[in-house]
Amino acid sequence: MNTFYSFTVSPPMIAAALNIPLKKVRRLFKDGRVVAGFCELWAETICGVRKHKRGNGVFSDCYALMPDEEPIEVAVRTLTPQGIKFQDSRYIGTGRTCDVPRLKASIRRFDSWIVFDICNFPRIAVYKLKGRTLEEWIDSGDLRPTGLKPQRFIDLLRSEDGPKWRPLDLAL
């Protein structure tokens, strides 16, 4: 089952902690590249996953330990106002291409996906998705290598059977 969370951070507290102007916090937290490190930390505290010790792999990657089982590989991604892509980073950017087989291979590397939605910063939504959900979106033609715009991502989540919201009370 896919699970969704949301929490609100305090831009003034972030500005004070980082010793930067409040205006800059709002601008920086719209950029997924800047927020990625925070998302990895939040994935640890909110979702109980751990960052791989080997550092950044192809993605920002983590794992979760399950009792009496092998670790579950988890990918951490950021949904920005520009959208989200799920393929390996080597297929993202100017001059780089991706096709459906490469997208599927990228998704199959992970058992679970944690997506941090920063579109409505300072409110941040967190979506825990099963890898098979993303594969179903590819098979239905909804997810392509070009990625998803925020509203389309949310619409697809709403169409899923049985998503469960869990409120969070975080002092961030």
Image (spheres, rainbow, N blue to C red):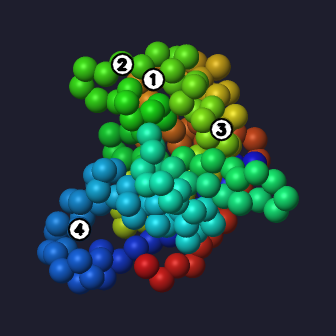
In screen coordinates, is 149 left or right of 1? left
Read off the residue under disc 1. 145
Read off the residue under disc 3. 131
Query: In x, y percent, where is residue 72?
Result: 69, 50
Question: Is residue 129 at all visible to an observer of this figure?
Answer: no
Residue under the point 66% across and 58% down: 64
| Labels 2 & 1 near each other (Cβ < 8 A) | yes
Read off the residue under disc 4. 25
Disc 1 crowd, CA 10 A, few/some/many (<14, 14-19, 20+):
some
Residue under the point 34% across and 45% down: 81
Numbered tag placed on residue 97 in the rendering:
2
Disc nearest the viewer among 2 and 1: 2
Residue under the point 63% across and 47% down: 73
Q: Quadrant of residue 109?
A: top right
Question: Is residue 66 at all visible to an observer of this figure?
Answer: yes
Q: Give me the C-alpha separation between circle 1 and circle 4.
A: 30 Å
Q: Give me the C-alpha separation between circle 2 and circle 1.
A: 8 Å
Q: Amino acid at mark 4?
A: Val
Pick whichever, 56 or 17, lies toward us. 56
Query: In x, y percent, where is residue 161?
Result: 75, 41
Q: Amino acid at mark 1?
A: Pro
Residue under the point 53% across and 56% down: 52
Disc 3 crowd, CA 10 A, few/some/many (<14, 14-19, 20+):
some
In screen coordinates, is 104 left or right of 171? right
Query: In x, y percent, where is residue 115?
Result: 51, 50
Pick whichever, 15 or 57, lies toward us. 57
